[in-house]
């Protein structure tokens, strides 16, 4: 692709892609839920490694810790729809051969463990080559999607649309299914990112998203021939995207409405917590959201107590949607968490549960009085389906409760006026054991 990456047409394409409300840059790359998934997916990969090491992983994908973490990738449907297909057991082909072959399972676990622990790009590439030497039938570069969430500046995502877009743009002939092909794609995407660093992020999700949209046919790559007529036709095609912007904007407005609802529920919990006399913490990446004529973080704690920040999983705790802290505790060791709330408007409850587990299990001997999943009234079935996963076997023991939006909305004002502590919240929520 000599000379291609530096020319003006490709710059124009990248700029148009970034501005398109319906393209992956705005719908996925800038999506705040994507950022929250990094921590939870890392935690999930560590669970897979632990299960394989301890011999408790089992012989099936369904119900395993691997299904849980891959599901959290596949639910990002803007770019990862179908990412779980590669890991589904194909009984007639006996693939992928990490369920029935213990040696291959251990090799896969060692690969994931290396990816979690190492920090350098060369180490990751060597981990890929070491796994490839095992020639595990049916286990190809789909695992690169897990690597991306562990090391987004070193390893890009990998799927059919990304490969098709890359080949269309560069004239390369990268194929699916082999790790060497993935490493060739990676080298090209790193080069493209470096040549367009003024427009593309060091997070390789950005350039992968561009390739995805090219591979899906949303955009057409600029001609490589230098033919003026071909260039003019391409520019006309690029301008055509403007006609689609109105529809994409409507979809984006719907997504913004969902975000508004999420923020609104956080605001209810903020105001209720303050009214009940608690100090309130708002997720670090949500404090600047507009709410009620101000910011969501107005009147809330600006730092977490030192004893919380010193715990394992502290980065995840900072992203819990709302925490109620003991206002009477004035020193760092006494600032206990009274309640934690994860608001799950439309996404999977997986990430929220992982963050609450980080909080509850990060400091043995310290008990959080209330752990709440706050979700729309109609999501009760989703909650139960997620919690039946073996990876969440500890959740019920922790007394996590389900708090429907409707109950919170109907009773929040009376709870603020007459409530004391958590009694009123407990009265309108349900223990997960009671949802069966």
Image (cartoon, rainbow, N blue to C red):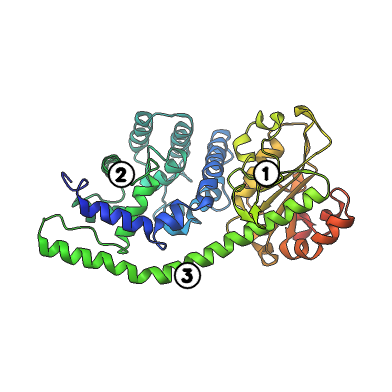
Within 10 Å of disc 3 (Cα), the crowding (few <14, some 14-19, many 20+) is few
Residue 59 in view here: no
Residue 350 locus on image (x, y percent): 60, 51
Label drawn at residue 289: none
Foreground of the two, 262 or 388: 262
Which residue is depicted at the point 74% across and 66% down? 406
In this view, the mark in front (3 or 1): 3
Which numbered disc, 2 or 3, marks the residue that appears first in the sequence? 2
Residue 298 in view here: yes
Q: Is residue 216 above or below residue 86?
A: below
Q: CA distance from mark 1 to mark 2?
A: 35 Å
Q: CA distance from mark 3 to mark 1?
A: 34 Å
Residue that mark 2 sits on: 182
Which residue is depicted at the point 21% across and 51% down? 8
Secondary structure of the residue carrying numbered label 1: helix
Within 10 Å of disc 2 (Cα), the crowding (few <14, some 14-19, many 20+) is many
Residue that mark 3 sits on: 250
């Amino acid at each position: 692709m000599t000379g291609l990456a530096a020319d003006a047409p490709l710059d124009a394409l990248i700029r148009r892609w970034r501005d398109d409300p319906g393209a992956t840059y705005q719908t996925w790359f800038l999506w705040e839920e994507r950022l929250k998934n990094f921590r939870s997916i890392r935690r999930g990969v560590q669970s897979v490694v632990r299960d394989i090491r301890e011999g408790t992983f089992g012989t099936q994908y369904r119900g395993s810790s691997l299904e849980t973490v891959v599901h959290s990738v596949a639910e990002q449907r803007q770019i990862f729809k179908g990412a779980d297909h590669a890991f589904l057991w194909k009984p007639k082909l006996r693939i992928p051969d990490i369920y029935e072959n213990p040696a291959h399972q251990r090799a896969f676990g060692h690969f994931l463990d290396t990816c979690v622990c190492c920090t350098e790009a060369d180490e990751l590439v060597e981990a890929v080559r070491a796994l490839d030497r095992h020639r595990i039938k049916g286990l190809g570069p789909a695992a690169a999607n897990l690597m991306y969430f562990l090391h987004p500046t070193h390893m890009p995502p990998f799927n059919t649309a990304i490969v098709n877009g890359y080949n269309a743009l560069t004239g390369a002939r990268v194929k699916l299914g082999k790790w060497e092909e993935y490493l060739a794609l990676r080298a090209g995407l790193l080069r493209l990112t470096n040549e367009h660093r003024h427009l593309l992020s060091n997070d390789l999700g950005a350039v992968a998203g561009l390739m995805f949209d090219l591979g899906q046919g949303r955009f057409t790559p600029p001609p490589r021939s230098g033919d003026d007529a071909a260039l003019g036709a391409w520019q006309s095609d690029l301008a055509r995207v403007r006609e689609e912007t109105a529809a994409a904007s409507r979809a984006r407005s719907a997504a913004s409405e969902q975000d508004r609802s999420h923020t609104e529920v956080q605001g209810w919990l903020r105001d209720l917590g303050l009214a009940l006399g608690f100090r309130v913490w708002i997720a670090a990446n949500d404090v600047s959201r507009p709410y009620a004529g101000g910011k969501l973080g107005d009147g809330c704690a600006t730092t977490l107590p030192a004893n919380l920040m010193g715990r394992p999983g502290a980065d995840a705790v900072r992203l819990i949607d709302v925490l109620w802290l003991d206002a009477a505790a004035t020193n760092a060791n006494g600032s206990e968490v009274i309640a934690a709330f994860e608001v799950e408007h439309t996404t999977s409850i997986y990430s929220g549960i992982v963050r609450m587990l980080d909080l509850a299990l990060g400091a043995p001997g310290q008990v959080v009085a209330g752990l709440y999943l706050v979700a729309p009234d109609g999501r009760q079935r989703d909650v139960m389906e997620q919690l039946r996963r073996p990876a969440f076997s500890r959740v019920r023991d922790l007394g996590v409760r389900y708090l429907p939006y409707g109950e919170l909305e109907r009773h929040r004002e009376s709870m603020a006026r007459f409530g004391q502590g958590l009694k009123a919240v407990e009265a309108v929520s349900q223990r997960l054991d009671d949802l069966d």
